[in-house]
Image: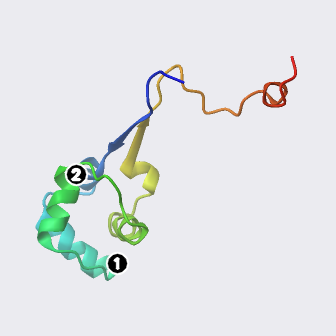
């Protein structure tokens, strides 16, 4: 099955800006204060500047707690027109016409 893929956008920088958090140092301090979560300054900087390949659940929870947001705010989803999020018709699944 060909076609376009669902695109996921990492929106950490946008969420930070909407909460008046402007740099990695500020976010790192808030992660410790609000969530008791420690990351190196370099790790926080990379999270801000690059879309991660993977995010640990603990990191996601800490970011959401710290920024008072939901995972839905951190991830933007762009669904191509030819990708359906609906389940296939039940008759098609059973092979009936």
Give whichever of discs 1 and 2 has the lower sequence position. Answer: 2
Q: Residue at x 37, y 51 (%)?
A: 74
Q: Position of residue 27 (x, y in %)?
A: 20, 67
Q: Residue at x 32, y 83 (%)?
A: 36
Task: Name which quarter of the figure residue 38 lies in.
Answer: bottom left
Q: Position of residue 32 (x, y in %)?
A: 25, 80
Residue 17 marker: 2
Quadrant showing the C terminus: top right
Q: Secondary structure at mark 1?
A: helix
Task: Name which quarter of the figure residue 77 lies in.
Answer: top left
Q: Position of residue 49 (x, y in %)?
A: 17, 51
Q: Secondary structure at mark 2?
A: helix
Residue position marked by numbered label 1 in the rendering = 35
Q: Residues within 10 Å of mark 2 (few under 14, many from 20)?
A: few
Residue 20 marker: none
80 over 11 or under it: above or below: above
Q: Is residue 88 left or right of residue 27?
A: right
Q: Is residue 49 left or right of residue 18?
A: left
Label 1 vs label 2, nearer the camera: 1
Q: Residues within 10 Å of mark 1 (few under 14, many from 20)?
A: some
Q: CA distance from mark 1 to mark 2?
A: 19 Å
Q: Position of residue 29 (x, y in %)?
A: 19, 75
Q: What colouring style does the render use?
A: rainbow
Viewer-side residue, 95 vs 82: 95
Viewer-side residue, 38 vs 82: 82
């Amino acid at each position: 099955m060909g076609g376009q893929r669902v695109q996921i956008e990492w929106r950490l920088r946008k969420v930070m800006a909407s909460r008046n958090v402007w740099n990695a140092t500020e976010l790192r301090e808030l992660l410790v204060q609000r969530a008791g979560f420690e990351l190196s300054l370099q790790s926080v900087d990379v999270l801000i500047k690059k879309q991660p390949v993977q995010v640990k659940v603990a990191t996601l929870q800490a970011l959401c707690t710290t920024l008072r947001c939901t995972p839905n705010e951190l991830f933007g989803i762009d669904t191509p027109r030819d990708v359906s999020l609906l389940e296939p018709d039940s008759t098609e699944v059973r092979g009936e016409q």
